[in-house]
Image (spheres, grey):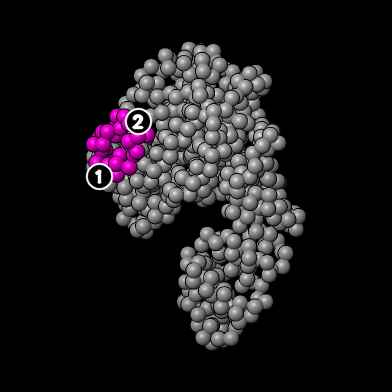
């Protein structure tokens, strides 16, 4: 029960401090009525609205406060902090033009510039924050976030180490640095910091989930299952853990998850991300029970949530593809004999097409270093693509130097490394120009099997948001096929198409051909990619740990009704072998 003493304004401030935002909003509105000419209650209302997920209402409140007092800097700063929640990063920067150059202002600027793909400006603002507050670990974590946003993993790890020096007991820092450590091939270090984060703060759910995921990525399936079960012993309705566990177990262990998932669904907020995760989990359970129809229903419902939150915009993607292809209009000679101490092999294709399998096979060669979905050049080229910047000899050399600077530590004796970022297919012209000596392996697979695998998975973030919608997926697949037709013309005999269906039926015969194309010696162990000791940071981590098999070939036929919108959306001139059901 709230005390009746004290003004409505002071009560609102107290409630904000206790993070009771709805009650704070109630008293802030009361304070507005009590003092209609004061900007402070409107500012507090805006803070409360922002905290409960209503940024539009928050912006109205901050603007009203500024009309009452144009030099009210707190309201202007809060306004700038709220605009990004609406995707209005330019407005955030405009708002900050009238705010003093404080650390908080630099912090907001850095976030806004990063969102607007202005790397140097973002890093400069983050650096200004650090200069003004050198002992504030937030500044280093901010700059690490920005560096990761632009693929600068090695640089980001330096910042996390500085944040760790300031506060060695900060579980958040340890949790955040675990994944980039793994991406930089430091899997044991990634495991160590995640374990340390959990030891410091056993109730930190992000740390718990990261530790469980790291075990899975390292092929330690049993330890991963144990960690997820430990999480569920603390929170039986933890949606992410239930979904992840449903992907790791099978048989009776999978069916036993049905009751916990049902209980969680009964209590979860409808239309939430957690509900979508639980629907994916239940879909996996239905597959285990042989109920494909109900599984497809749950998968469709789950994807509908993510598609609504992050819709795929086909037009700008087509326009960007056109701009890229226009840079490489005609056949381009390449110098395959260009000297290098480390030949890049780019494995491209659509996600879920088998790129992880091909990388693991190549990585079993003792002369090859598999780097996973590195994709650093894609990040480095982002501003060139989005702003139409020049790509001449000086830029090419700069990209090559910077890309090689950011390579993880590679043991001596290796002569090639594999970057298996699938969607590098859109950058083949750039890749072959920066690295003429590189090899490009394009993994082809029946698009219907890929679509089924994509739709049944759950890709985090917005980079693969087309996977949430079957019609959008068809648009993206058509774009991929069109770009590959162009690249084959521009770089004849420089792209090797390997068909997944053929590879899984004859991995030794087809693998030998890939090895020859990549100028590698074929070794018998390359036919056993499941024995790889490398970490796998993709959704293929669990599938890769079993011997190669063709069981998933043609799986789409069992779900043809589900896939009908996708199949109808495929361009028959680009996919002539695909017949509509």
Residue 412 on the magenta span = no
Whether residues under marks 1 and 2 lie with C-beta atoms below 8 angstroms apart, the answer is no
Residue 309, percent from left and from top = 42, 55
- Above or below for 504 versus 76: above
Q: Residues within 10 Å of mark 1 (few under 14, many from 20)?
A: some
Kindly indicate the quadrant of the structure image that contains residue 405.
top right
Query: Which residue is disc 2 drawn over?
Result: 446
Q: Is residue 59 above or below residue 507?
A: below
Relative to 309, 137 lies left or right: right
Q: Which residue is mark 1?
A: 294
Comparing 466 with 406, the one in front is 466
Choose the circle earlier in sequence order: 1 or 2: 1
**Image vertical order of residue 483 relative to residue 231, above or below:** above
Residue 450, percent from left and from top: 37, 35
Residue 78 seen anywhere in this rendered image of the structure = yes
Please tell me the numbered disc located at residue 269. none
Instruction: Give me the residue at 65% from left, 78% from top.
Output: 70
Instruction: State whether the magenta stretch is mostly helix, strand or loop.
Output: loop
Q: Quadrant of residue 184?
A: top right
Residue situated in front as seen by the camera: 4 or 440 = 440
> Residue 201 at what x, y percent from top left?
56, 49
Badge 2 crowding class, 10 Å Cα cut-off, few under 14, some 14 to 19, many 20 or more, is some
Q: Over which residues does the magenta segment extend?
A: 554-581
State the CA–CA distance, disc 1 to disc 2. 24 Å
Q: Report x, y in % for residue 259.
A: 30, 46
Nearest the viewer among 92 and 262 is: 92
- Residue positioned 23% across, 36% down in the render: 581
């Amino acid at each position: 029960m709230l005390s009746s003493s004290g003004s409505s304004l002071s009560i609102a401030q107290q409630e904000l401090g206790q993070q009771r935002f709805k009650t704070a909003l109630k008293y802030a509105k009361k304070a507005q009525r009590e003092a209609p000419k004061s900007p402070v209650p409107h500012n507090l209302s805006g803070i409360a609205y922002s905290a409960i997920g209503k940024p539009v209402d928050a912006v109205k409140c901050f603007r009203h406060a500024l009309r009452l007092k144009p030099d009210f800097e707190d309201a202007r700063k809060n306004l700038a902090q709220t605009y990004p929640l609406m995707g209005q990063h330019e407005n955030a920067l405009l708002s900050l033009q009238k705010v003093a150059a404080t650390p908080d202002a630099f912090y907001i600027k850095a976030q806004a510039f990063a969102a607007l793909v202005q790397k140097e400006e973002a890093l400069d603002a983050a650096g200004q924050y650090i200069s003004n507050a050198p002992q504030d670990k937030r500044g280093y974590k901010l700059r690490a976030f920005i560096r990761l946003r632009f693929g600068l993993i090695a640089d980001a790890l330096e910042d996390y180490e500085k944040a760790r020096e300031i506060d060695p007991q900060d579980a958040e820092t340890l949790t955040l640095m675990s994944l980039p450590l793994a991406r930089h091939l430091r899997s044991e270090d990634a495991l160590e910091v995640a374990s340390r984060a959990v030891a410091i703060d056993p109730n930190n759910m992000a740390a718990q989930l990261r530790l469980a995921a790291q075990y899975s990525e390292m092929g330690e399936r049993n330890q991963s299952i144990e960690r997820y079960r430990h999480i569920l012993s603390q929170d039986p309705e933890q949606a992410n853990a239930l979904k992840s566990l449903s992907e790791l177990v099978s048989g009776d262990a999978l069916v036993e998850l049905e009751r916990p998932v049902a209980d969680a669904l009964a209590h979860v907020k409808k239309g939430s991300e957690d509900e979508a995760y639980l629907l994916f989990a239940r879909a996996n359970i239905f597959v285990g029970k042989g109920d494909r129809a109900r599984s497809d229903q749950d998968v469709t419902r789950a994807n509908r949530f993510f598609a609504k939150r992050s819709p795929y915009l086909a037009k700008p993607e087509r326009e960007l593809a056109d701009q890229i292809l226009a840079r490489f209009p005609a056949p381009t000679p390449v110098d395959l004999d260009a000297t290098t101490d480390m030949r890049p092999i780019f494995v491209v294709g659509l996600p879920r097409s088998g790129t992880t399998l091909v990388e693991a096979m190549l990585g079993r060669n003792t002369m090859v270093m598999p780097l996973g979905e590195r994709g650093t050049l894609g990040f480095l080229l982002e501003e060139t693509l989005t702003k139409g910047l020049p790509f001449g000899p000086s830029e090419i050399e700069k990209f090559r130097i910077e890309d090689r600077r950011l390579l993880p530590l590679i043991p001596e004796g290796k002569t090639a490394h594999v970057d298996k970022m699938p969607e590098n297919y859109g950058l083949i012209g750039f890749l072959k120009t920066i690295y003429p000596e590189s090899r490009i392996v394009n993994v082809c697979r029946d698009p219907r099997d890929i679509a089924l695998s994509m739709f049944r998975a759950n890709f985090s973030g917005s980079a693969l948001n087309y996977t949430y919608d079957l019609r959008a997926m068809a648009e993206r697949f058509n774009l991929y096929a069109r770009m590959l037709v162009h690249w084959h013309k521009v770089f004849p005999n420089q792209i090797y198409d390997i068909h997944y269906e053929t590879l899984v039926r004859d991995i030794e015969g087809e693998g030998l051909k890939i090895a020859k194309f990549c100028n590698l010696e074929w070794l018998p162990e390359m036919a056993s990619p499941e024995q790889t000791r490398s970490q796998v940071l993709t959704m293929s981590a669990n599938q890769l740990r079993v011997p190669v098999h063709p069981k998933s070939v043609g799986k789409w036929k069992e779900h043809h009704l589900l896939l009908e919108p996708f199949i109808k959306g495929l361009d028959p001139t680009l996919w002539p072998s695909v017949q509509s059901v």
